[in-house]
Image (spheres, coloured by chain):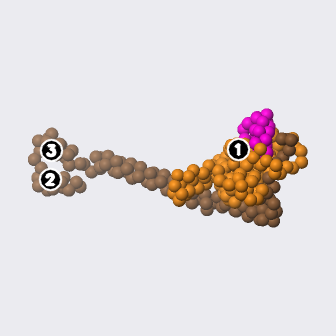
Chain colours: A brown, B orange
Amino acid sequence: MDDERIDFSLLDPKRDEVRWGRIVTSLAAQAAAERRARLSVEWQMARWARPVLAVAAGLCLLAWAGGWLGSGRASVGGETPIVLTVASWAANQQVPDPGALLQALRGE
Amino acid sequence: MLSPDETARLVRLAKQGQADAFTLLVCAYLRAVYAVALSIVGRPADAEDIAQDACLKAFEHIDTCREPERFVGWLLQIARNQARNLLDRRWLRDVAGEGAKVLEFATIPSAAAGQREDLLAALATLDVRSRELVLLHDLEGWTHPEIAAALDLSEELSRQILFRARRALRVELGGAVPLEGSHG
């Protein structure tokens, strides 16, 4: 009758119950240990360290660039750029004395 | 086989790292994974290795199993992928070593001594799905509803495939068909 099962017991790894039990126990223990390790704080930190560092580096870069640009704009009010100094002389038809010229070139 | 609800419950516990959940899942499904692997690679020793590797890989990536109720089908697919990878490596090794010989299944001489080898040779005459189904039913003891749910096919198709597979195996095995008691 075709509704009778074929006996595959010769291919059944559970034939050796002791050995199979050892395999199951070892496998489950290994899987559980690896899972717990993945859930640990240390593992999570190691996993996320690189992306966090990349973001931090990006923020630092932005902060530096913003500070650099800001320091550039601040110098217009605080430290007059040489271009504006020369433009002022020209507008007022002034001839700078050597001391004033040297000071402008030094950017101070 | 565990019920889908029980399987889902254990999968959620396993995601939290509970060791008992892993043990119960391995106990419940390792042999089924072996059966699927055997249906592809054709060698029991290789199938055992693949079954263990597949289970470890599944548990390693258990977070990607987004539907715990479908864990079994997901696990079996991992086993199939691992088995096919082994076949690819075996093919490459055999082609490199022996020339243009292509092995899709373990080549077991039909005249080889031993009923075990006869069973493997007879299985080799079936297509992969038929091998998988007949092993899950007759070796692992799954019912047609369980097979249908795990393999994503209808119960009716499962019965048809099993019927044809058993008939083909009986033809291959001739008068030396190992039979168990009558089951539906």
Sort mark 3 into few (<14), some (14-19) or many (20+) by Cα contacts within 10 Å. Answer: few
Nearest to the eye among marks 1 and 2: give it: 1
Kind of residue at disc 2: Leu
Chain where mark 3 sits? A
A69 and B79: which is toward the camera: B79
Q: Is residue A69 left or right of residue B129?
A: left
Instruction: Residue B146: give x, y in percent of width and height.
Output: 79, 42
Q: Disc 3 marks which residue? A: A89
Q: Is residue A69 magenta?
A: no
The residue that appears at 49% across and 56% down in the rendered structure is A53
Image vertical order of residue A22 relative to residue B149, above or below: below
Q: Disc 2 marks which residue? A: A101
Kind of residue at disc 1: Leu
Residue A10: image quadrant is bottom right
Residue A13: image quadrant is bottom right
Labels 3, 2: one chain: yes
Instruction: Residue A78: give x, y in percent of width and height.
Output: 29, 50
Chain where mark 2 sits? A
Disc assigned to residue B126:
1
Q: Are marks 1 and 2 in contact (CB under 8 Å)?
A: no
B184 and B56: which is toward the camera: B184
Quarter of the image for the N terminus of chain A: give it: top right
| Numbered range of the magenta stretch | B148-170
Sort mark 2 into few (<14), some (14-19) or many (20+) by Cα contacts within 10 Å. Answer: some
